[in-house]
Amino acid sequence: MDFLRELARRARPFAERDMAELREFARARLGIADVQAWDVSYASEHLRQQRYAFSEQEVKQYFPEDKVLPGMFKLVETLYGLRVNPSSAPVWHEDARFFDILDGEQLVGQFYLDLYARNSKRGGAWMDDAITRRRTRSGIQTPVAYLNCNFASPVGGRPALFTHDEVITLFHEFGHGLHHLLTEVEDLAVSGINGVEWDAVELPSQFMENFCWEWEVLQGMTRHADTGETLPCALFDKMLAAKNFQSGLQILRQIEFSLFDMRLHCDFDPNGSKSVQQLLDEVRGEVAVLIPPAFNRFQNSFSHIFAGGYAAGYYSYKWAEVLSADAYSLFEENGVLNLAAGLCFRDEILAVGGSRDAMQSFVAFRGREPTIDALLRHSGLLEESGAD
Ligand SMILES: [Zn+2]
């Protein structure tokens, strides 16, 4: 609760600025004199398009699969001192591929990669474990992961093209995969992602996403589908500028959901005099910049917390970002491709799985407990200081 309230305090001036900009834009350009809750998405999309004139389609031309995939593999090889090699195994569909991860001559893990959408395939993107590392009577069992996405498949004999969001998704799932595959634990219940606390399990996946915003990494993963050119710096700058569009408003919205969820589970009495609506109104009164209309019943469809496994856990989205941003800040300090930092992350975070407390692992890696500074900086929520 302290964490959420502190984050709300820091985000609030930015959210108020976001809202003031939106009101002014809607008044001057869209003829909306008084922006209502139901105008916000519409007006925001117009403002975004006007301010950062580029399209996902334009960016997509620069991310062909045959540059992105080798680029991602090269990144983890550089960071963790590994090799990723194509391998073979029986597969369920011709699009599915199989890879080995080698440390020197030692096989440490293997994974299936099934990238494309097709009929009958579950939607979304996910990592799942096929085999988990553990000691058996016949020796150590090598872990195997499934990595699944639903990207558009190649057409016309050309490689598949990914949007930048899809590249981020791929890195995210690969981060989960590495958590599962690079474990050195030998007991099933705490090997890989098993037994890792709910609010730390997204650390390795969100950590990987940071590299998708790194020019040094990204540029080498691009080649325009027609011209063969790498991603222009000017376009990358626009993508970067658009990344934190309305981040103040977005963070406050997530904090509103998180505080409501947590208070519902820790200080709400269903038989008491206060209604769920009143509790939500209190939370909104405390943190929201944009108050929904009185007839809004958001709480009735907040399925994350009664059907999605996030009961008293919605905050973990934001908390895992604190961990991943702060972990990544060590790479920003030492160079984003720093091998020593990479090996330390591998040893202290990825290798240990659920065999020790996540906070101990974080401290072992970072040398201190996490702070919210890196997240604020990555989200554009620090006042300009003039430096870097
Ligand atoms: Zn995830």
Image (spheres, rainbow, N blue to C red):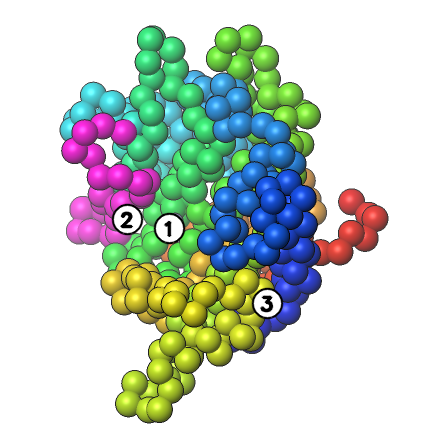
Q: Are marks 1 and 2 in contact (CB under 8 Å)?
A: yes
Front tag of 3 and 2: 3
Quadrant in which the C terminus appears: top right
Sequence-wise, which precedes: disc 3 or disc 1? Answer: 3
- At x 41% / y 80%, what residue is drawn? 278
| Pointer 3 residue Cβ closer than 8 Å to ligand 1 | no
Select label 3 or label 1 by which is in front. Answer: 3
Tell me where the magenta segment starts and ends, as one range. Answer: 117-141
Q: Circle 2 is placed at which residue position?
A: 133
Can residue 192 be seen at all in this image of the molecule?
yes
Which quadrant would residue 364 be assigned to in this image? bottom right
Taking the image as shown, residue 120 lies to the left or right of residue 199, namely: left
Amino acid type, residue under disc 2 in the picture: Arg
| Crowd rating for badge 1 (residues with CA inside 10 Å; few <14, some 14–19, many 20+) | many
Q: In the picture provided, is 43 more to the left or to the right than 154? A: right
Q: Earlier in the sequence, mark 3 or mark 2?
A: 3
Residue at x-position 38% and y-position 19%: 160
> Is disc 3 in contact with disc 2, using a CB cutoff of under 8 Å?
no
Residue to which mark 1 is pinned: 184
**Vertical side of 2 occupied by 238: above or below:** above
Q: In which quarter of the view is residue 308 placed?
A: bottom left
Displayed quadrant of residue 66: top left
Circle 3/circle 1 CB separation < 8 Å: no
Of callouts 1 and 2, which one flags the residue occurring earlier in the amino acid sequence? Answer: 2
Could you say which disc has been placed on residue 340 in the image? none
Residue type, label 1: Glu
